[in-house]
Image: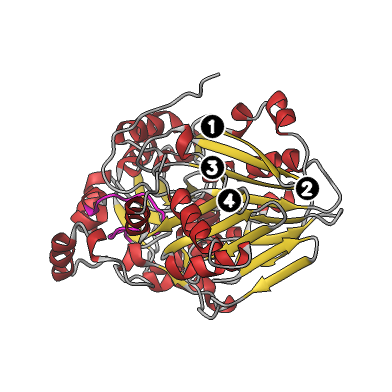
């Protein structure tokens, strides 16, 4: 049966915010089924395509397609994947680009040194440069994501080194940017995290001694696995019949985890870099209440990632918290829709206000961010239409004023409302009575107890690593914006 393909017009390099999972066992063989359940737990990280690759004594069987995990992997499809002692899986969404089966992962390649499967989360800032080098040497690319670039980079090093883990180690010297990576060879499962640790990756162990890796700890919980630890930035972990080995050649940086993991991407029941996502959002809400108090009757949160911060805001402010929105659970996340029209349609059917909670009251709405402003304007309107007397919008993130080069969907600063409007202008645009953003200092404080470093480049324009000049498409605009010194 031919796979469905949806073509979306786009400009620029596609980048993914995805979820990865891997499992290794010396005993059990139902690795495909376990990967399926774990991808279910990571479905929020990618809703456009998914895939599973199973290793059965060196033979890698795989399937990937456009669609949600339960739609792509029917019972019959899982049975066809067969049994094995290793598997990796992937859920993906494209922020711009073709939503096609060719861009789905895991990517499986056949090579003179043996087959290899790859799942990754992140974005290479030098991916275009590496791709061009391989194409000039005769390389042929079938998709538009970074997985093929990573595969070429590793296989090129595989010809020069004595092992697949050495090839991964050497490839990491050439790859720049964000990547949490799973590589499956005929006999080994390798997990690697980029030297800055932009994207999360953790390791766990099941009761029957399977070693598992995942983007978030919630994918371990669904298997009843024990969380062992997060991989360090730059760490390579190799699992084989010899046991578990760790290569820390690329380690040493404090790390620059994407703050949006805590603000939006991760599930609240996950623990990332030792920090509970729920607790981080709750504490952010408390800080927000101190920075931007409001004289109001009720605090409500925008589901889902605004709820925890709303609870924190209510706790700190003493204002009553209540449920103000009902969310349609059959609508996918509007922020990660690839076109503006699709985002608009999703917002219109995503939420409904509970009128008795807000009618006649002064309401504080807590949301995780304002990016384009479309959702915020609609949300404020919903609360107004439900009878609210006043609407005070509070955002548990700083203003989103710059591009992300490491995997979050922003193709131009022109699409960022905080880049082109002042705080007063945004307030008027979204129809609120007041608006307050969390400070950069406030958002970074969530890692103080744990010694974590974060990437806040989308809020500050300052990045943990140097971004190639060719990626600064709006450089002149950025200079003007800095000269304006807009403050919130």
- Residue 410 colored magenta? yes
Q: Which residue is mark 1?
A: 65
Look at 42% across and 42% down and name the residue there.
94
Q: Which mark is residue 105?
A: 3
Do labels 1 and 3 touch, CB within 8 Å?
Answer: no
Q: Which residue is mark 4?
A: 112
Do labels 3 and 4 touch, CB within 8 Å?
Answer: no
Q: Position of residue 20 (x, y in %)?
A: 59, 50
Pointer 3 or 2: first along the chain: 2
Q: Position of residue 316 (x, y in %)?
A: 52, 65
Q: Which residue is mark 2?
A: 85
- Residue 359 colored magenta? no
- Number of labels in the image equals 4
Pointer 1 or 4: first along the chain: 1
Indicate which label's residue lies in the foreground, 3 or 4: 4
Indicate which label's residue lies in the foreground, 1 or 4: 4
């Amino acid at each position: 049966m031919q796979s469905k393909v949806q073509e979306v017009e786009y400009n620029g390099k596609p980048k993914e915010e995805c979820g990865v999972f891997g499992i290794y066992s010396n005993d059990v063989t139902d690795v495909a089924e376990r990967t399926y359940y774990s991808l279910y737990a990571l479905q929020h990280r990618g809703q456009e395509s998914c895939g599973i690759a199973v290793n059965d004594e060196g033979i890698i069987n795989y399937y990937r397609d456009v669609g949600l995990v339960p739609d792509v992997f029917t019972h019959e499809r899982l049975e066809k994947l067969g049994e094995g002692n290793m598997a990796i899986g992937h859920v993906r969404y494209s922020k711009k680009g073709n939503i096609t089966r060719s861009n789905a992962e895991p990517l499986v390649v056949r090579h003179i040194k043996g087959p290899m499967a790859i799942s990754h989360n992140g974005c290479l800032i030098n991916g275009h440069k590496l791709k061009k080098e391989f194409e000039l040497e005769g390389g042929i690319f079938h998709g538009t994501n970074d997985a093929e670039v990573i595969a070429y980079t590793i296989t090129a090093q595989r010809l020069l080194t004595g092992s697949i883990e050495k090839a991964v180690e050497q490839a990491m010297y050439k790859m720049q940017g964000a990547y949490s990576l799973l590589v499956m060879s005929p006999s080994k499962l390798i997990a690697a995290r980029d030297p800055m640790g932009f994207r999360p990756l953790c390791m766990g162990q099941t009761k029957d001694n399977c070693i598992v890796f995942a983007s978030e700890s919630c994918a371990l919980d669904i298997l009843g696995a024990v969380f062992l630890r997060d991989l360090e930035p730059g760490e390579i972990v190799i699992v084989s019949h010899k046991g578990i080995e760790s290569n820390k050649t690329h380690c040493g940086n404090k790390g620059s985890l994407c703050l949006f993991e805590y603000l939006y991407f991760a599930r609240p029941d996950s623990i990332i870099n030792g920090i509970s996502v729920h607790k981080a959002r709750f504490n952010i809400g408390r800080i927000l209440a101190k920075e931007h108090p409001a004289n109001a009757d009720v605090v409500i949160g925008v589901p889902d990632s605004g709820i925890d911060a709303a609870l924190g805001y209510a706790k700190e402010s003493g204002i009553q918290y209540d449920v103000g929105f009902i969310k349609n659970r059959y609508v996918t996340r509007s922020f990660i829709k690839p076109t503006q029209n699709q985002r608009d349609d999703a917002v219109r059917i995503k939420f409904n206000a509970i009128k008795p909670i807000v009618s006649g009251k002064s309401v504080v709405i807590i949301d995780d961010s304002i990016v384009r402003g479309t959702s915020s304007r609609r949300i404020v309107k919903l609360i107004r239409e439900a009878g609210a007397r006043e609407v005070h919008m509070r955002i548990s993130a700083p203003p989103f004023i710059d591009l992300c080069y490491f995997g979050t969907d922003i193709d131009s600063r022109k699409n960022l409302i905080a880049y082109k409007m002042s705080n007063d202008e945004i307030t008027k645009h979204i129809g609120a009575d007041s608006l307050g953003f969390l400070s950069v200092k406030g958002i970074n404080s969530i890692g103080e107890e744990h010694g974590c470093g974060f990437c806040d480049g989308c809020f500050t324009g300052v990045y943990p690593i140097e971004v190639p000049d060719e990626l600064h498409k709006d450089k002149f605009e950025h200079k003007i914006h800095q000269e304006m010194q807009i403050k919130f």
